[in-house]
Image: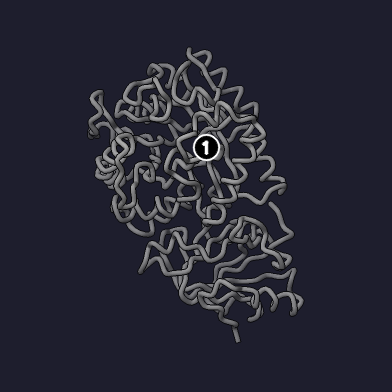
């Protein structure tokens, strides 16, 4: 008879059973209450079969051929693909010292901070992070350490230093280029260095003194040239944009993702025209709402800057709803690392997209799993529960169909088929398939 562990967090019985039965090198399966399918449906009555680092089958309960003792039965919980944070900054500290840390910390210290933040995200069920701005050499080091297995970490995709102007947003990271020729040259250098995508600061930003979030940092022709170059190079282009003009321009210039898309005008008022919505839909550009920025979660603050971010977020919620209703893909990135946004809060973003924006539950979950994997060219292996996908899995304590807040209650996390502890390390005593295979 299948051993049932219910919602208990102690799975030592399951692990011990697999070792005692000599099945350490064989397939094993999870039988949850429901599973998020690539369609966005949450379906029950399924076994998810894992071998090594991959999912090898999604079959009816009891039809996998896996021995009973190697089935983890979780009758009250939901199984999701590992979450994907489509907008984070691993070297950022999430406090008021972001800029001073970036300027004053050595590369070694920034690497160490990135490792810690990546492991924090992993404990929350985030198995892929898209780093949207850090020193290029630092982030390439972090990615290499993750890929090689030197550290237990989510998969890390990196832009390196975002392209920005002299005195522009995040100039303190590096990546300064002013003319069109300089921008193209820097983009090519970043690709030569090995980045996964290109990030450009089309407007100023809120954490860089002297930059203006309401105004463009580059003329239209420069962004058009960069968009064309990224297409030639085969690299996604992520565009930081805080004004509606910037959002519309980015869509028309082949942006893959527009980050923030806060649609301010020159006076700071939020507005979204039908023409801008049309530009997004025609281009197929995704919008990463970074909806955790400014989310006070019911708290109040006397800090005027924090309150302004909250007011802007509130004003943008119906605009994100309009984008979604028009067919724009909205992503559940967090901007993790900026002041007030801790790493790994993709679940919080998913909840906000569902409850506050009004995106249906299944689609909101896909916004933090399947959709970002597709946007960044990893859709065949990441972000989905299907045969041949990588076994990055998140088992929740509860059923998201009745309590979406369960997405913030991870019970167990697997990375490449390896069981991860709550401290972000491999679980001691885990079976061999969970410990030995690497992509």
Q: In this view, does 209 lie above or below 85?
A: above
Residue at 64%, 76% in the rendered image: 14
Residue at 57%, 36% in the rendered image: 158
Q: Residue 377: give x, y in percent of width and height.
A: 54, 42
Q: In which quarter of the image is the N terminus?
A: bottom right
Q: Is residue 24 above or below residue 344?
A: below
Q: Which of 278 and 336 is in front in this view?
A: 336
Q: Is residue 97 above or below residue 291?
A: above
Left or right: where 144 falls relative to 114: right
Query: Disc 1 designates what residue?
Result: 92
Q: What is the residue that sits farthest to the bottom in this orientation? A: 1
- Element marked by disc 1: loop
Left or right: where 39 falls relative to 311: right
Q: Residues within 10 Å of mark 1 (few under 14, many from 20)?
A: many
Q: What is the residue that sits farthest to the right in this orientation? A: 22
Answer with the quarter of the image where residue 433 lies.
bottom right
């Amino acid at each position: 008879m299948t051993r049932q562990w219910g919602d208990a967090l102690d799975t030592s019985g399951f692990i011990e059973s697999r070792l005692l039965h000599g099945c350490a090198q064989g397939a094993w399966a999870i039988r949850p209450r429901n599973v998020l399918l690539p369609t966005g449906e949450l379906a029950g009555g399924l076994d998810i079969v894992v071998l090594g680092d991959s999912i090898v089958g999604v079959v009816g309960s009891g039809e996998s051929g896996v021995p009973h003792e190697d089935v983890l039965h979780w009758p009250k919980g939901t199984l999701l693909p590992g979450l994907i944070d489509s907008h984070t900054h691993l070297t950022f500290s999430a406090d008021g010292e972001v800029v001073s840390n970036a300027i004053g910390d050595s590369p070694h210290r920034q690497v160490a901070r990135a490792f810690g933040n990546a492991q924090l995200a992993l404990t929350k069920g985030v198995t892929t992070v898209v780093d949207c701005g850090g020193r290029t050499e630092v982030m390439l080091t972090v990615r290499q350490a993750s890929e090689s297995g030197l550290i237990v970490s989510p998969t890390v995709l990196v832009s390196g230093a975002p392209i920005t102007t002299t005195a522009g947003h995040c100039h303190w990271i590096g990546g300064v280029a002013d003319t069109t020729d300089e921008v193209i040259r820097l983009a090519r250098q970043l690709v030569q260095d090995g980045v996964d995508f290109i990030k450009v600061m089309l407007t100023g930003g809120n954490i860089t003194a002297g930059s203006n979030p309401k105004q463009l940092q580059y003329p239209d022709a420069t962004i058009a040239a960069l968009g064309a170059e990224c297409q030639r190079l085969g690299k996604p282009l992520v565009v930081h944009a805080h004004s509606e003009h910037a959002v519309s321009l980015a869509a028309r210039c082949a942006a893959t993702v527009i980050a923030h898309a806060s649609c301010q005008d020159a006076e700071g008022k939020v507005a979204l025209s039908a023409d801008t919505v049309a530009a997004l839909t025609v281009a197929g550009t995704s919008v990463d709402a970074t909806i955790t920025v400014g989310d006070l979660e019911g708290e109040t603050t006397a800090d005027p800057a924090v309150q302004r971010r909250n007011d802007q977020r509130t004003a943008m919620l119906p605009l994100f709803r309009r984008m979604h209703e028009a067919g724009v893909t909205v992503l559940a990135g967090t901007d993790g690392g900026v002041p007030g946004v801790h790493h790994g809060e993709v679940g919080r973003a998913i909840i906000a997209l569902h409850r506050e924006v009004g995106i249906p539950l299944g689609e909101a979950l896909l916004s933090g799993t399947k959709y970002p994997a597709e946007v960044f060219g990893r859709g065949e292996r990441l972000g989905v529960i299907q045969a041949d996908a990588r076994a990055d899995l998140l088992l929740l304590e509860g059923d998201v169909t009745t309590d979406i807040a369960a997405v913030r209650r991870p019970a167990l996390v697997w990375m490449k088929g390896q069981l991860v502890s709550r401290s972000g390390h491999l679980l001691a005593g885990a079976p061999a398939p969970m410990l030995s295979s690497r992509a």
